[in-house]
Image (cartoon, helix red, strand yellow):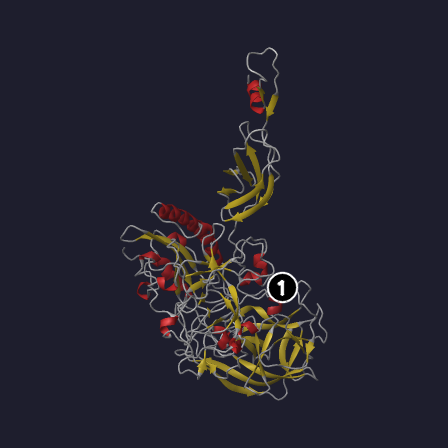
Amino acid sequence: MKHFFQSALTALSLCVLAACGGGGGGSTTTVTTTVPGAPTIGAATAASGQASIAFSAPSSNGGADITAYTASCVTGAVAAVTGTASTTPITVLGLTNGSVYACTVTATNSVGTGAASASVSVTPLSYATPANFATAITRTFTPSATLTSTSTVTNRARYMVSGAATASTSSNYLSIGDTYSASTGYSATSGTLSSTASYNDYLTKTIQLVEYPSSSGYYRLDSHLHPNNSIDVDPADSKLKFRNNFGKAATTYGFVTFSYDASTHRLKAQSRYTYSYDSTTYAATYTLASTYSDKYVSYSGGVYSLASTGTDLYLYATPLNLGIPTFMDPMATSFVTQGAASFLNKVSSTSAYEAQIATGVNSTYSNQVSAAGANTTTKANAAARLALIKTAVEGNSGTLRYAPALYAAFRDALLANTLVSDAISDGTPGQNLVPYVYFTNEMDSSGVYHPFMVVVNYGNQASPNGLKDVPSPPCSGACGTAVTRFSNLEKYITMIPMRNYGQVSDVTDNATLTTNLWSDASGSNGLAVLTKNAYTYADIADNGLLIDGSVMFPAFNNTLVPSHLRGELSASGCHVGQGGGGPHCHADGYQSGQGLGLYNDNDYSGNTHPPVIGFGYDGIALFAQYRSTTDSAMLGYGTLDSFGGHNHDAIGYHYHAHTVADYTPDGYSTSYKSTIHVLMKGAYIGRIDSVPYFRNRTYNSLTTNKYMGGTVSP
């Protein structure tokens, strides 16, 4: 019986009588109906947790109308995930982001389902994040040209100092050591550069020569990787060491100045200056302690020292592209001569501060902050909390703006950032730059849930911040007497709203933003009255958080012109504002071929969408830019609105870093025309008026803001 019914389902014979009136004399025609043929598979387009499978109908429908098509996607040993449709394409939901699926399509008619098409591979959108600086510097770096020694010294340029007249893989170069000692600083050692040398190998051997005093012809030798440190001599043994001269360090430290003679190839010592700072104001002083008449840099057995007989040393321009690019200073601003303002000290003890935060988070969320930095237990607890939040919000007539996977990816990347460069006045290499990230979900008096991603961050980059290179940084105090060239640890508790509050159609729809750049400048940059737009109607301070834990500001400064036109930004698009503090970034420092930025070319590899690099305080995610020559096949390529964002492939509306070509500020001549490298233009497109306590400093602590997860009573 089973065989009979199976046969009946695969083929039906229909008798068609040629004429009515019985069987005599008539004729019959037999028509056989079968299952359809296999569809022809087309492209599979990835999105977040889903894929769209395109196909064309089979050449044969089996003699009966096709009633449905089914796409089936399989990964590993997991059961197939399917989707159905009556026409192309088919959307398959419920896929795991980042997993590779093999998808096929079948056709079904009244007889049954036919053979499957050939398979196509698809990887649902995984939320890629850029490698942090500690990881990026381990990548191999290959110079584009052979190293060539130079006979001239340029102030503020970077060199590698070698004992070889011709560069080779066995040549030794002056290098800063790996281990820091509070009493002795970093060692001055030597190392080679193999054909597989990493970025870090080059960075540790890159020395910046800074003329001191100005126009003297003598130079201080600063490490690029650890720019707080300059070459000093230990009077006890004449050995050279890298010692901190720009932060909270031993008052016995100092630096030596040198001249370089290209004909004799000698670095000759000139003077030693001792370093000290006021423990209350942190104002630094440098005192001439000694001068030298016959001391040179001598190298022997891996040790550098001062001796009466020097060693031949050759200067090679570093092959790394470390200077401020033209697009960050298109006006070629002159380097200002004012001294550096005092650094600040806002965090007396990171361990005490982090303990205070951990104990201040209430019991509902405290298991997410049981350990600082990256931790497997807090990661699992955060994932569990995210799942609970999603269920609660959706059961409360709301939605999250993004899939939980995006928040989880951003959280994990933030927590993986540790300080690599000794470039912060009160920072310690190896410390967490973002000790905690946790998720909260509190209800307001109307019964509405308001979920937040809460980030505890120190507001600094892991990499060298380049502040000493900025041509014209913001002033401090009595403007014109000192400029901000040092950074310190900040104390931020950043709240990113996760509920989807929608978007505005006009910048002024966000009525909460009563203090903004436009109103602060009375709508004028001094030359023209400006319209309220995505550039001008922006927060007067930080408007978002970057994935390394530093913060971003609008593209315009408080005079309503793009910050980069003032020559006030570093190579990464950042600076420290008037009065000191942690760096903030006005512009996107991405450079194609440069591997040491916030995000780099390698961070696109294998992804279907640029990596996420930040969040606006309105809860809108910020992704890296689409590179015009390589990313045309990526999801959403080429479609950004006036805010610099778009919505595609079920990701949800999001911003992108991008460039605005040939922009001339209102009221200025075309000589001020330049390309703006935008992180966020400035204005919030996310609707902020319903966000509890949005940018309200009164409610910016665990003791005043329940949505932050504190112990304050509801």
**Element type at mark 1:** loop
Where is residue 653, by image quadrant?
bottom left
| In-front residue for pair 598/686 | 686
- Above or below, 272 against 141 in this view is below
Q: In this image, 344 relative to 710: left or right?
A: right
User: Is the residue marked by circle 1 packed among few (<14), some (14-19), or many (20+) residues within 10 Å?
Assistant: some
Q: Which residue is mark 1?
A: 198
Q: Position of residue 671 (x, y in %)?
A: 53, 78
Q: Position of residue 448 (x, y in %)?
A: 31, 51
Q: Is residue 468 visible?
A: no
Q: In this image, 260 relative to 585: left or right?
A: right
Where is residue 120, by image quadrant?
top right
Residue located 44% across and 52% down the image: 402
- Above or below, 41 against 203 in this view is above
Residue located 59% across and 29% down the image: 62
Q: Position of residue 513 (x, y in %)?
A: 35, 65
| In-front residue for pair 333/38 | 38
Q: Is residue 469 visible?
A: yes
What's under tag 1, amino acid-wise?
Ser
- Above or below, 369 against 698 in this view is above
Q: Which quarter of the figure is the N terminus placed in?
A: top right
Residue located 36% across and 72% down the image: 519
Q: Which quarter of the figure is the C terminus placed in?
A: bottom left
**Residue farthest top in this picture:** 24
| In-front residue for pair 356/156 | 156
